[in-house]
Image (tube, rainbow, N blue to C red):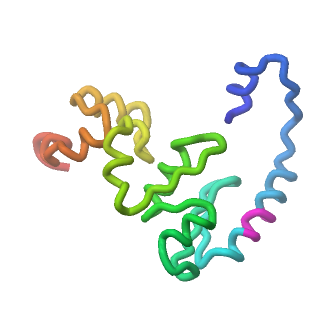
Amino acid sequence: MPAATAHRLCPHGVFLPVDGRKYRAASEQVMGILARHADLLERLSIDEAFLDVSGRVADFREAEALAGAAPNKFLAKLASDLDKPDGLVVIRPDQVEQVLAPLPVGKLWGVGPKTEKRLQDLGLRTIGDIARTPPDRLWGPGGR
């Protein structure tokens, strides 16, 4: 959670100064460990990465046992945000529609406040609403 949020929730907390050099060094160590256990590591930020383990596991169940899994990066990112800070959400291939449909449109990776408002102005509140909407209604007159 951002420090500003933590301070608001716990105004009497003790907040230590940020040491970016230590954070980066720790991040490099963690990413090195992760890289040894993945076929491919794609770093997103100092504390986030995608790991492709498809060549190291026999099936989805084995992938889940490593740390969590989803059928693709988009769903993995979405799952990682569903039960923060300590939750682990696994999205199995046969659960994708069931998990996504009730989620608010703002949960979509890449949908910021402006796009969320535009979707809501169209009456689209959930990802399921978007999935059920004809593409021409989403793009409007004239296409993309």
Determine the main secondary structure of the stretch shown in magenta: helix
Q: Position of residue 89 (x, y in %)?
A: 53, 51
Look at 34% across and 28% down and name the residue there.
117
Using the rendered view, name the quadrant where residue 26 is placed: bottom right
State left or right for residue 124 relative to residue 140: right
In the image, 3 versus 53, the foreground residue is 53
Is-magenta flag for residue 29? yes
26 versus 39 height, above or below: above
**Which quadrant of the view contains residue 2?**
top right
Residue drawn at x 66%, y 44% as measured from the top left: 86
Q: Which residues are magenta?
A: 28-33
Q: Is 53 situated left or right of 45 in this image?
A: left
Q: Residue at x 43, y 40 (%)?
A: 107
Q: How many marks?
A: 0
For the N terminus, the quadrant is top right
Q: Position of residue 41 (x, y in %)?
A: 61, 70
The percent position of residue 19, horizontal first and vertical second, equals 86, 44
Viewer-nearest residue: 2 or 93: 93
Residue 133: x, y in percent?
Answer: 17, 43
- Which residue is nearer to you in this view: 1 or 54? 54
Q: Is residue 68 depicted above or below 104 in this figure?
A: below
